[in-house]
Image (cartoon, helix red, strand yellow):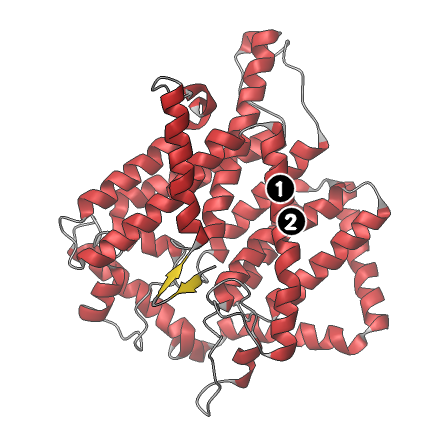
Amino acid sequence: MAFPVGPIHIFPYRVIVPFIWLFFIAEVILRHGKIVISRIKSIKIYLQFFMIWLIYALLSIVWTLDKIAAVKEIISLFMGVSIVFFMVYFLSDKKGVWNLYKLWIFLLTMVLPIALWEIFTGNHLHISGLYTYQPTKATNEYVKFMPSVIFHNPNDFATFLALSVPFVLVWIRYAKKVVIRVIALAELLLAFYVLLMTYSRANYIAVMIEFAFLFFVILKLNGKIRFVVSLMFLGLFVGVIQPGLIVKIAGLFMGQVTSLLDPDAFYSGSVFVRINLIKNSFVFLWKTFGFGVGAGNAEYWMENFAVYNTLGILNVHNWWVEILVNFGIFIFAGYILFYVGLIKNIYKIYNQNPRLPSTSIKSYSRINKSHDKMIGESLLLSLIGFFMASISSSSIMTLRPQWFLLGFALAFLNYKRNQWKNKICTS
């Protein structure tokens, strides 16, 4: 979210991060120059990867062709990594991670009414890229009514929704009071409707992957049966109350998803452009001997050295390819290991099956608190969905929810590992 100040825009995010750094430095000074390493020790390998990534980005300035774009990219990367570090350093305890979960739910609750206002009025906040949008004969009228709330465009907002759906879904699963479950279900259905109106097909698929993972991996047999029965009753209830709505939503959803399978899509439209963006990126990677074009330079290369036609679109529109073409195969491989390792360890935590020394297994008492289960399951589903959700936006580097998700996941992992370590040491 940005606020206009004369000819420039001030992002609170970019103001708050420097203040947190000042607070952190002041704390270190008061501790006589010592950083409390114990706060981050259990997940230090993840933070070391981010440090390597930042160093590589700085070194890449040497061979970048657009130095200004490189500096902007490095600043964005530094801001994102800073958020991850501070979330781990200051919020890796029971209260901290639970407050992060509640904050995520709260933020989703706050933006949904704004999204409905946009959908039904066609108006937008001034920070939206659609604020001054005027449909023409060459564009679609429906774009004016797509929600973007505090994000620059509908795809960014849709990515936030796809990452948020698991938090509400898990809230429903673990709520003990019927009233709370009804409220959470209403919010989930509202989030689905708003997501549908963003027309972001990649995020539709991301949510489908989240539900599939929940059904096939997390739920036991009884849970699967309850899930199917609940879904049937919910569909029946909505069908009786608003039969036309079910048909309309189903038609819109299927139309968007099946459009991806249209053979003509590979020769025109957004799918055609995205394929050519990826093909160009691999050409650039080859020309730079696998080291990448350098921080933030993918767009410059796309504009000046493209081999395949992208119809004027310069941004890669794929987070995974963006990392690969900008930072090369080594950082890309490191990021893949980081991402897979984080999911793997969150899954271990969710199953309460930490890797312990054989002499400590008997003295270790399993922890099965509902809050920890809720957080672990939410993060797991959201991280799984991120794989597909991250290819929707033009660039994920500047998308704040991704950094907050990674910081949240690492803070939770750090908290649980420290908790296990303390239990072993005191047993």
Quick one: quadrant of the C terminus?
top right
Secondary structure beneath label 2: helix
Q: Is residue 228 visible?
A: no
Say which residue appears at 35% left-offset and 38% top-offset: 50
Residue found 67% across the figure and 20% down from its top: 366
Q: Is residue 49 left or right of residue 179?
A: left
Question: Label 2: few (<14), some or many (≥20) within 10 Å?
Answer: some
Residue at image coords 54%, 85%: 141
* Residue at which label 2 appears: 105
Q: Is residue 330 left or right of residue 365?
A: left
Q: Position of residue 371 (x, y in %)?
A: 69, 34
The answer to which of 15 and 128 lies nearer the viewer is 15
Q: Is residue 246 left or right of residue 254?
A: right
Which residue: 26% across, 49% down? Answer: 327
- Give the residue at mark 1: 101
Identify the amino acid type marked 2.
Ile
Can you name the residue that lies furthest to the front here? 6
Query: Looking at this view, is 30 or 118 the one in front?
Result: 30
In the rendered image, residue 307, in percent from the top left (x then y), is placed at 21, 70
The residue tagged with tag 1: helix, strand or loop?
helix
Rendered view: 78 above or below 34 = below
Q: Is residue 16 above or below residue 354?
A: below
Pointer 1 local density, CA inside 10 Å: few below 14, some 14–19, many at least 20: some
Q: Residue 226: where, in percent of width, then height?
A: 80, 48
Question: What's the amino acid at mark 1?
Answer: Tyr
Whether residue 119 can be seen here: yes
Report the Cα–Cα distance between label 1 and label 2: 7 Å
The reply to whether dot 1 and dot 2 touch (C-beta < 8 Å) is yes
